[in-house]
Image: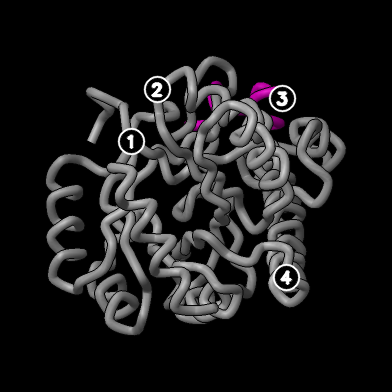
Amino acid sequence: MAVKNSAGRADLHTHSTASDGTGSPADNVRLARETGLAAIALTDHDTTAGLEEALAEGEKLGIRVVPGVELSTMQDGVEIHVLGYFLDWPDGRWQERLRSQRDARMRRGRMIVERLAELGMPVTWEEVERAAAGRASGGAIGRPHIAAAMVGRGYVSSVAEAFERYLGSTGAAYVRVPRPTPLEAVGWIHEAGGAAVIAHPGLYGRDELVEALLEAGADGIEAYHSDHGPDDEARYAAMAARFGVIATGGSDYHGARGGEVFHGPLGGRTVEIAVVDRLEAASRKYR
């Protein structure tokens, strides 16, 4: 669902320097305004460190900012991402759970660096940290930072190649660490007063698992995503209607590294502003 007339539209999946994006939280909000969007969600990986900045910039520019997050989970050896919206994000228990997620992400990053060395492509952790420089305090280091270090070393020509050959779920350096299940993540989000949405289901190849999560209480499914084709979008929109949940959408914007935009441009996938209202209404059930 590419933007044609962006008035009254929302991009509900973006990342900033608080995790593995290249623009600051305020940059994302400013770009949303330049793109003509009415609303944007900041959904950094396992952190809410960028929300205060994004909300302040939204207030200044008249852009509705949806507080969000993207949690990494594991089910039957498949990494599943769960989006949370309108949470009570300063809550202490919620923040402790996010810290545990970031600790797991850090362990995985160091294990990937060790695996790369075994494959004859040594990268130092200091190089990874330099690639992540500028992230917010409490932000997360992720695979795109490792990919950027690999590009810097000349092992690969692009971040996309690094993921395809080494860092993606079928890559030679991919490492799994213990994660909560997606159903546990849905529960965490509900306990924090938020609405839970299954992210980019087309990337998993496990529609039966996605349906089970919707049946078990997830509030929505991300039907519209930069990595979904038209058939995927139609199938997941129909799935949302069948289960009576919210069909959401977003670009999964991470910014550009080396001239390439990761996933898609901000505003490349959007939904009507009414979807934002539905998510906010759904979150009220858990407060």
> Upstream in the sequence, badge 4 or badge 2?
2
Residue interval drawn in magenta: 148-161
Look at the numbered discs 4 and 2 and tell me whether their residues touch, using CB distance below 8 Å.
no
* Residue corresponding to mark 2: 36
Compute the Cα span from label 4 to label 2.
32 Å
Mark drawn on residue 153 = 3
Q: How many marks?
A: 4
Q: Does residue 96 lie above or below 65 as drawn?
A: below
Using the numbered discs, state the Cα–Cα distance from disc 1 to disc 4 in whole angstroms: 29 Å
- Tell which of 51 and 257 is nearer to you: 51
Identify residue type, mark 3: Arg
Q: Are marks 2 and 1 in contact (CB under 8 Å)?
A: yes
Amino acid tagged 2: Gly
Residues 12 and 73: in front is 12
Q: Which mark is residue 9?
A: 1
| Mark 2: few/some/many CA within 10 Å (<14, 14-19, 20+) | some
In the rendered structure, which disc, 4 or 3, sits on the residue that comes first in sequence? 4
Magenta residue check for 45: no
Q: CA distance from mark 2 to mark 3?
A: 38 Å
Between label 3 and label 1, give the one nearer the viewer. 1
Mark 1: few, some, or many residues within 10 Å (few <14, many ≥20)? many
Q: Secondary structure at mark 1?
A: strand
- Residue at 28% over, 45% down: 224
Q: Position of residue 229 (x, y in %)?
A: 20, 40
The reply to whether dot 1 and dot 4 touch (C-beta < 8 Å) is no
Q: Position of residue 1 (x, y in %)?
A: 23, 36
**Residue under numbered circle 4:** 91
